[in-house]
């Protein structure tokens, strides 16, 4: 508590004498003299010591305004305007002050024009200083939050370089473009020609897709010979063909290629290498479902293979989305750093599982049926490294706003793929962790929507533990 002493005659501001006014008090270091928002009652003149003037928001963001020493005064603004205190004042060390009541202060102003002029001058200086401080802070915040093309070039370029270098030395490396420069000697026939051969029973139809796709829907009477299981299943297929009457005179029609034409042409080439005659591929990779008789089972959800800890962590963004509905929490920079750590962990975990097995991830990309042939392998090589790089940048606080936009972009692309797969009833899992993955369903969409919302929160409010263009800054909640 402040130690009160008898009133004394003291030298005031600019040589003004405060005779028999107020009380002399001694306050220890750390004691608060004025609290922001309270009703004004006293005017203070510092005889010795130092005090700090600051403002503080409801959620604890503190702005230090100035420090005052012996001969200075404070508390006059609220007394003049009649408004609540605009700032708080706290003793930085043991200080001796004169505490003047509002009635005494009004009397002093009425009979001391010199003090009134001094207060007006001081207020104008504070306004000018405040404007300059505000401008400086706004400029700093703008520079801190700016995103340049260099940020994206840095992260994407680093991902591409790492992908290409590691692929060269990877025992499981894949070509940058699938079958680049390969000329298949497999003739392609139109749907009309395939219909004619099928109706005349002059065709052996072979489905080159994965078994899950075949079971869901295929040309009636077609055999399934998945390309990825060719060596294992070919002997049974060969036996079946040999038992088919007139097989030598029939045309083997391979179909089932996706937008990437990943399976059918390659399967046709392998069949010809095994000595099969009259092998052709269906030119229209998607029209067979409408032009030829089909059969299959009701669409079923793909089997679920748990993702482990990352799969559970994926639910955290959904929970945090509920917190974001609360305005003070939504704007919190501390929530942003929690989001950075969660997203970084998720994307790094998923990336590490795909980096060393790009061929497996490439097949998962093909399953979605949205990527052209030339882009599948490039996507399968670069995307895992991009996930790793932006995940590390988020956790380390490097270019976090640009990293958040890249992760948001990945999530948008993935959500589009998931929704498309759901509407087309594709029997696939998400392909997040190589062969392991969760079924494609609306729960998976919800998880990624939660991550997308978290990216937006990081983009808007991240300002804690960041590496900006001026170097690494531990940005606590004091300005």
Image (cartoon, rainbow, N blue to C red):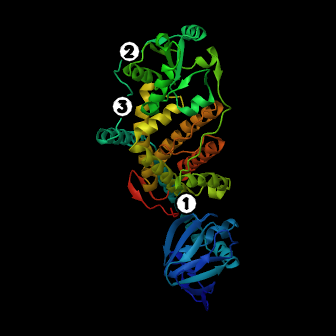
Determine whether the residue tagged by mark 2 lies in a helix, strand or loop. Answer: loop
Q: Which residue is mark 2?
A: 185
Determine whether the residue tagged by mark 3 lies in a helix, strand or loop. Answer: loop
Q: Which residue is mark 3?
A: 176
Q: Earlier in the sequence, mark 2 or mark 3?
A: 3
Question: In the displayed structure, would residue 168 be above or below residue 288?
Answer: below
Which residue is pictured at 34% across the width and 37% down the height? 173
Question: In the displayed structure, would residue 386 be above or below residue 282?
Answer: below
Q: Is residue 261 visible?
A: no
Which residue is pictured at 40% across the width and 33% down the height? 378
- The crowding category of the residue bearing disc 3, from other C-alpha atoms within 10 Å (few below 14, some 14 to 19, many at least 20), is some
Tag 3 and tag 1, C-beta contact below 8 Å: no
Q: CA distance from mark 3 to mark 1?
A: 41 Å
Q: Name the residue at the left extreme.
A: 169
Q: Earlier in the sequence, mark 3 or mark 1?
A: 3
Q: Earlier in the sequence, mark 2 or mark 1?
A: 2
Residue 63 x/y as whole percent: 54, 64
- Label of residue 152 in the image: none
Q: CA distance from mark 2 to mark 3?
A: 22 Å
Tag 2 and tag 3, C-beta contact below 8 Å: no
158 or 88, nearer to the observer: 158
Tag 2 and tag 1, C-beta contact below 8 Å: no
Residue 319 x/y as whole percent: 64, 55
Tag in front: 3 or 1: 3
Quadrant housing the N terminus: bottom right
Determine whether the residue tagged by mark 1 lies in a helix, strand or loop. Answer: helix
Residue 257 x/y as whole percent: 50, 23
């Amino acid at each position: 508590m402040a130690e009160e002493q008898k009133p004394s005659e003291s030298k005031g501001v600019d040589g003004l004498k405060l005779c028999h006014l107020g009380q002399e008090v001694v306050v220890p270091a750390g004691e608060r003299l004025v609290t922001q928002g309270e009703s004004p009652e006293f005017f203070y003149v510092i005889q010795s010591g130092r005090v700090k003037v600051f403002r503080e928001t409801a959620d604890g963001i503190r702005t230090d305004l100035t420090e005052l020493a012996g001969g200075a005064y404070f508390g006059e603004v609220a007394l003049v305007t009649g408004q609540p205190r605009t700032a708080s004042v706290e003793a930085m060390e043991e200080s001796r002050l004169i505490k003047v009541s509002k009635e005494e202060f009004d009397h002093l102003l009425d009979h001391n024009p010199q003090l009134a002029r001094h207060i007006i001058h001081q207020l104008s200086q504070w306004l000018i200083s405040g404007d300059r401080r505000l401008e400086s802070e706004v400029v700093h915040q703008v520079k801190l939050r700016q995103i340049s093309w260099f940020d994206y070039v840095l992260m994407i370029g680093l991902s591409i370089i790492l992908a290409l270098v590691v692929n060269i030395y990877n025992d499981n490396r894949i070509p940058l473009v699938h079958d680049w420069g390969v000329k298949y000697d497999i003739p392609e026939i139109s749907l009309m020609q395939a219909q004619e051969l099928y109706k005349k029973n002059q065709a052996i139809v072979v489905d080159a897709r994965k078994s899950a796709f075949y079971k869901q829907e295929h040309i009636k009477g077609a055999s399934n010979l998945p390309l990825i299981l060719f060596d294992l299943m070919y002997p049974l297929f060969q036996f079946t063909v040999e038992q088919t009457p007139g097989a030598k005179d029939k045309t083997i029609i391979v179909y089932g290629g996706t937008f990437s034409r990943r399976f059918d042409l390659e399967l046709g080439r392998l069949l010809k290498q095994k000595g099969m005659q009259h092998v052709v591929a269906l030119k229209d990779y998607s029209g067979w479902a409408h032009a030829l008789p089909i059969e299959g089972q009701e669409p079923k959800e793909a089997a679920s293979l748990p993702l482990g800890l990352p799969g559970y962590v994926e639910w955290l963004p959904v929970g945090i989305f509920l917190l974001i509905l609360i305005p003070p929490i939504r704007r919190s920079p501390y929530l942003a750093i929690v989001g950075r750590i969660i997203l970084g962990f998720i994307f790094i975990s998923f990336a590490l599982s795909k980096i060393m097995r790009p061929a497996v991830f490439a097949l998962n990309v093909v399953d979605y049926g949205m990527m052209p042939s030339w882009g599948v392998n490039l996507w399968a090589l670069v995307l895992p490294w991009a996930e790793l790089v932006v995940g590390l940048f988020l956790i380390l606080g490097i270019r976090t706003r640009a990293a958040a936009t890249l992760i948001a972009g990945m999530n948008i692309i993935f959500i589009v793929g998931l929704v498309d797969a759901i509407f087309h009833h594709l029997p696939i899992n998400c392909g997040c962790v190589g062969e392991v993955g969760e079924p494609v369903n609306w729960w998976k969409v919800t998880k990624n929507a939660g991550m997308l919302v978290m990216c937006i929160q990081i983009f808007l409010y991240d300002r804690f533990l960041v590496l900006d263009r001026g170097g690494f800054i531990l940005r606590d909640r004091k300005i």
